[in-house]
Image (spheres, helix red, strand yellow):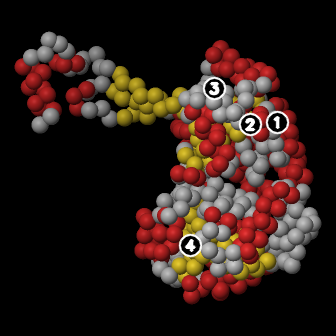
Amino acid sequence: MNALFSEPDEHLTTAFDALRSALAAHGPLPAERRAEALEDLARMVIRHGTDLAEAISRDFGHRSADETRLAELFPVVTAARHARRHLRAWMRPERRPIGMMFRPGRGRVHYQALGLVGIISPWNYPVQLTLLPLVGAIAAGNRVMIKPSELTPETSSLLASLLGELFRPDEVAVVQGGPEVARAFSRLKFDHLFFTGSTAVGREVMKAAAERLVPVTLELGGKTPAIVGPDYPLAKAAERIAVGKLFNAGQTCIAPDFVLVHASQEAAFADAFAAAALRLYPTFEGNPDYSAIISERHRERLLGIVEDARRLGGRVRSLDAETGPGGRTLAPVILTGLPDEAAALRDEIFGPILPIVPYRSLEDAYAYINARPGPLALYLFSDDRQTVAQTLERTVSGGVTVNDTLLHCVQEELPFGGVGDSGMGAYHGEAGFRTFSHAKAVFHQSRFNGSALTRPPYGRRVERLLKWVLR
């Protein structure tokens, strides 16, 4: 038994048992309740949007209210209403063809709620990454227990209060606490456990769940690359990468982590990125549009990445003279000339630091990406169809946006999830409904059928049948 994981405390057990008892007594949520809850969830987010934005800003030290509306409120409202519109179609059993030998029997797949779902959500988008998996779990008819992040206590407390008004305790429960609560939470006997966070913690969550054979969906992070093709306008690519990189001050799991540019364009791209960043944010400290780093500890970690690059001989270009202590704002930093062992090229950055890596050919760029763990996202900037097709074929990633950043994540008809070290499983839209459902195979035998042909005693009849089907 891993010593990191203690036994669940009484508060956790009480909430868990209430949900499990309701599931045993009443079963999954009926279709009418699911639809009602999804619409109520959308309305709740709209009605309390200002409260949520203010709570998040207090937790961060400052975060743009517009960024919260764009990245937290809009996706949740869109997802909840999309799920409500499509719910009946998703729930409908699907007919499947039956092999010739078994006709006129009929085959269907019935989608059934898994039962009790656990959700562990992170701090970087505390509303979106709590409520989007909740949308999928509720759409599928599950009862849900949520553990939000302790690093955003005001947001977590507000979400607990709002969800408590929206759902009965035997439908959705929210438990709060630090890492010890999360560890105990991940050892409960859920029917499915959904975790969003770092790869390192994801491994521990999966170990804990495996002890009880609890299936997991892991939405992790990693080193998301952006490739700038030689044919693409450099200034346009730099601006779009700057938007994706600096949104929420880089504290986004699918932010561009590093950029691959042709060696002949390395310096020009660094200049173009700096110019684009300063157009977007003419100042950083005190700018209402620019978010703070979540904690001083995380800011110190980022400064350590910069110092590591400097120590190893890399070129460090800060867009603000102030990169030392003072406040929780960190201006963008561009890193070039880094050796492979630099922390900026080895670890997920999760902040406004952008390493630029030169390549000689696109084949070299693909080899560089493929030599590392599979990323959660990949961004390609190219108008050449062959380059796009080749990149999609030659690289593996959770998702891709071509000629922009982040946007594949907010398409409700596209699944969102990682691969390898960046996660397993997917959600959003119908993919979320499927993740939180059991696809139950159902075969209906026809009144008139040929099953008697395959019953003992075996003889020439069965031999002739097998000879025919195995011909």
Is label 2 in contact with label 1 (beta carbons under 8 Å)? yes
Q: Position of residue 302 (x, y in %)?
A: 77, 64
Residue at image mark 4: 227
In the drawing, does residue 382 fall left or right of residue 51? left
Are the residues tagged 2 and 4 within 8 Å (C-beta)? no
Report, in whole angstroms, how far the alpha carbon at label 4 lies from the one at label 3. Answer: 42 Å
Question: Looking at the image, is mark 2 or mark 4 earlier in the sequence?
Answer: 2
The residue that disc 1 covers is 177
Specify few, some or many for label 2: CA neighbours under 10 Å numbering under 14, 14-19, or 20 or more: many
Q: CA distance from mark 3 to mark 1?
A: 19 Å
Could you tell me which residue is drawn at 73 percent across and 19 percent down? 18
Label 4: element kind: strand
**Residue 447 position (above or below residue 333):** above
317 to 424, vertically: above or below: below
Residue 273, can we see it? no
Kind of residue at badge 1 = Gly
